[in-house]
């Protein structure tokens, strides 16, 4: 069955970097349309970055220019390079796949229309 497992979160000072990753199983020979989401205490889950199987990327305005999503399809791995981290980036970060939204709308890639989700990895940015 499809399974996603995140790792690589941690604690870092403001301005630092982290690169969580997500390993996907159960999607051999399937297209990868993947995304990262985050949820901070007291806030709703929000889309951070998304990437299609063909390499198109989408970013939330709050992270554009600081975060970079990438994936290694051969190894079923998804990454989120996070640079110049801010305290407001503190959250649980989740990876997701199985996009079932409107592929013609880029904004949909950062919405909830994913069938499979990981358990999350915590990122804490201190000031």
Image: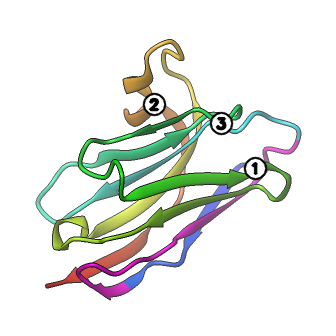
Query: In terms of secondary structure, where does tag 2 sit?
Result: helix
Instruction: Please tell me which residue is depicted at 55% across the width and 24% down the height of the picture.
Output: 100
Dot 3 or dot 2, earlier in sequence = 3
Dot 2 or dot 1, earlier in sequence = 1
Vertical position of residue 103 compared to residue 64: above or below = above
**Colour scheme:** rainbow
Q: CA distance from mark 3 to mark 2?
A: 13 Å
The location of residue 65, given as percent across then percent down, is: 36, 52
Q: Nearer the viewer, mark 2 or mark 1?
A: 2
What segment is highlighted magenta in the picture? 11-28
Query: In terms of secondary structure, where does tag 1 sit?
Result: loop
- Around disc 1, counting alpha carbons within 10 Å, would you say few (fewer than 14), some (14 to 19), or many (20 or more)? few
- Around disc 2, counting alpha carbons within 10 Å, would you say few (fewer than 14), some (14 to 19), or many (20 or more)? many
Q: Which residue is mark 1?
A: 1
Instruction: Please tell me which residue is depicted at 34% across the width and 81% down the height of the picture.
Output: 16
Residue 15 magenta-highlighted:
yes
- Around disc 3, counting alpha carbons within 10 Å, would you say few (fewer than 14), some (14 to 19), or many (20 or more)? few
Vertical position of residue 41 compared to residue 123: above or below = above
Question: Do we see residue 119 in this rendering?
Answer: no
Q: Which of the pair 52/101 is nearer the observer?
A: 52
Figure quadrant of residue 11: bottom left
Q: Nearer the viewer, mark 3 or mark 1?
A: 3
Q: CA distance from mark 3 to mark 1?
A: 25 Å
The location of residue 7, given as percent across then percent down, is: 55, 75
Picture disc at residue 109: 2
Q: Nearer the viewer, mark 3 or mark 2?
A: 3
Q: Where, quadrant-wise, is the C terminus in this rendering?
A: bottom left
Q: Which residue is mark 3?
A: 55
């Amino acid at each position: 069955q499809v399974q996603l497992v995140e790792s690589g979160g941690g604690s870092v000072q403001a301005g630092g970097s982290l690169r969580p990753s997500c390993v996907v199983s159960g999607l051999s020979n399937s297209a990868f349309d993947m995304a990262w989401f985050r949820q901070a205490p007291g806030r709703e889950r929000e889309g951070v970055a998304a990437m299609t199987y063909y390499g198109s990327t989408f970013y939330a305005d709050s992270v554009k220019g600081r975060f970079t999503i990438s994936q290694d399809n051969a190894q079923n791995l998804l990454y989120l390079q996070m640079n110049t981290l801010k305290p407001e980036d503190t959250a649980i970060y989740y990876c997701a796949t199985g996009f079932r939204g409107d592929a013609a709308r880029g904004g949909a890639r950062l919405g909830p229309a994913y069938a499979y989700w990981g358990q999350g990895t915590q990122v804490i940015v201190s000031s």
